[in-house]
Image (tube, rainbow, N blue to C red):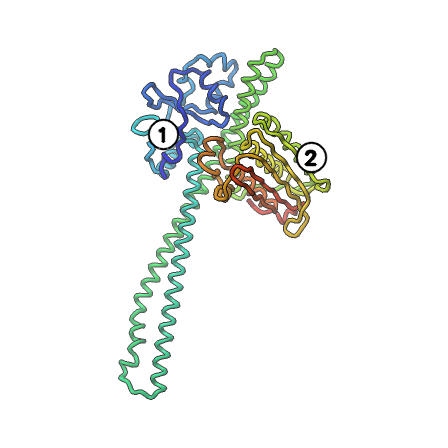
Amino acid sequence: MRAGDIIRAIEPIDERATGIDAYNRFAADPSLLAVGVVDPEARPVGLLTRAGFALKMADRFGRALYEKRPLSLFLPPDLLLVDVATPLPALNATILQRHDGALLEGFVGVSDGRYAGVGTGVDVLRATAEAAARTSKRLAAERARSRSIEASLLELFRSADALAASKRDALQRSGAVLPPRAVQSEPTQLAELFPHIERLFAEIRARDEALFEALDTAERANQAKTQFLANTSHELRTPLNAIIGYAELLQDVAGDHDDANMAKDAGRIADAGRHLLRLINDILDMSKMEAGKLLVSVDEFDLPALIREAVATLALQARSNDVKLHTDIGPDVGVVHSDAMRVRQCLLNLLSNAVKFTRGGAVVVRAQRCRVMAGDGVRVSVIDTGIGMTPEEAAKLFQPFMQANAETARTYGGTGLGLAITKRFANMLGGDVTVTSARGMGSCFTLSLPARLEISEARAA
């Protein structure tokens, strides 16, 4: 896999544009994390990130100061240019040699010196995860094949040895008189095979050791990536929280002065900050789960109330997509004993996903009591009338950094982490998430959980 395979062909901004042009570009596409800046000859001169731009605009009088200023004021000094032919391992090495924030800042892809698109940290992580999964699968297959060959050779040798002994015994019982060499010829030939078989086994063992070493190297690299993500995510959450806080303060000030334009602009900054914060929180949660450090806190809570709260949270997003939200909660659902925060996050992820992929349709949240793992449980289904998926797309949906297809990722955005995290959370809480879907017919995601989770039953992430 090469850099060109993960670069997104995002239309660049001309370097002669101003801050208001960039503001309008980001406001029009909330999922846009970065956009390239080019000169009139389509040569890249910078990378404009949503986070960096939002920091400038969040300053006091930020819009008034920067809306007519050139984009050069927003561009970081150390632009990372990557040729589309660069192999993925070399791209990873280049990014990790830079400062800690380089992974989330992204890079500009070039072909023959011309702008080709933008690559983000999420794209790099998704491609790295896919490559690691393929490598692990190949190593496991090679190891199984080596063991199979070794077992087959041992069985073949035993069979040949038994056959030779049987023939020798039969000849001796018949009273046939054969020269000593004739009686011992087959055992002697088999004995001569011993050095060759031992040498073959030694080669197989050496190959196994090499495979184990490669797998161990891949696991260490994955752990290093997890630690890097955790550290970087913590560093980014502090300024993002400040941006969101100042934007909300500006909204209050605008409300006091009846300044609708200022309130609208501050709202967009706050929304963009929350979007980035959700992305960082997802990455941090995934890194914690991979490190086995995500904890479960069990308590009793009212599941119907939690479902209605989650639906209310998504109401604004649903209205913007002309989606109608409905609930169908069974009268016996009631109180459950689990981790309310993780259950809420699962519901929000499923609801957000349903609303995002539905335009002008409906999303129904249905909850009922059921049997889970031969015990009392609850089942919450999120049913939408959106674009749906093929069975092949649905099969890879719960893998980290994976989306149904490339076209979906380009059109709807997203990191490919939400559903993977939801699956992990559900497993932690003793349950599961499943999906049924058909292309063009919508999807149904079902979260099944035990109604009463004991701490001893909670699984480590």
Q: Secondary structure at mark 2?
A: helix
Q: Nearer the viewer, residue 417 or 28?
A: 28
Which residue extends farthest right?
Answer: 331
Q: Quick check: 95 left or right of 434? A: left
Residue farthest to the front, as pictured:
440
* Distance of label 2 from label 1 (alpha carbons): 48 Å
* Image-quadrant location for residue 352: top right
> At label 2, which amino acid type do we have?
Ala
Three-letter residue code for mark 1? Gly
In this rendering, does residue 135 appear at all? yes
Residue 56 x, y percent position in the rendering: 48, 19
Q: How many numbered discs sit on the rendered protein?
A: 2
Which numbered tag is attached to residue 109? 1
Looking at the picture, how far across and down is residue 446, in whole percent? Answer: 60, 42
For label 1, count other residues whose C-alpha is less than 10 Å away and answer few (under 14), some (14-19) or many (20+): many
Quadrant hosting residue 444: top right
Left or right placement of residue 456 versus residue 31 in this view: right
91 is higher (above) or lower (below) than 370: above
Q: Nearer the viewer, residue 244 or 120?
A: 120
* Pick the front one: 32 or 457: 32
User: Where residue 276 sits: x, y (%)?
Assistant: 51, 28
Image quarter (top left, top right, bottom left or bottom right) of the N terminus: top left
Q: Is residue 104 left or right of residue 312?
A: left
Identify the mark at residue 292; answer none if there is no mark: none
Q: Earlier in the sequence, mark 2 or mark 1?
A: 1
Q: Regarding mark 1 in the picture, which secondary structure is present there?
A: strand
Q: Residue at x 40, y 50 (%)?
A: 138
Return the residue at label 2: 305
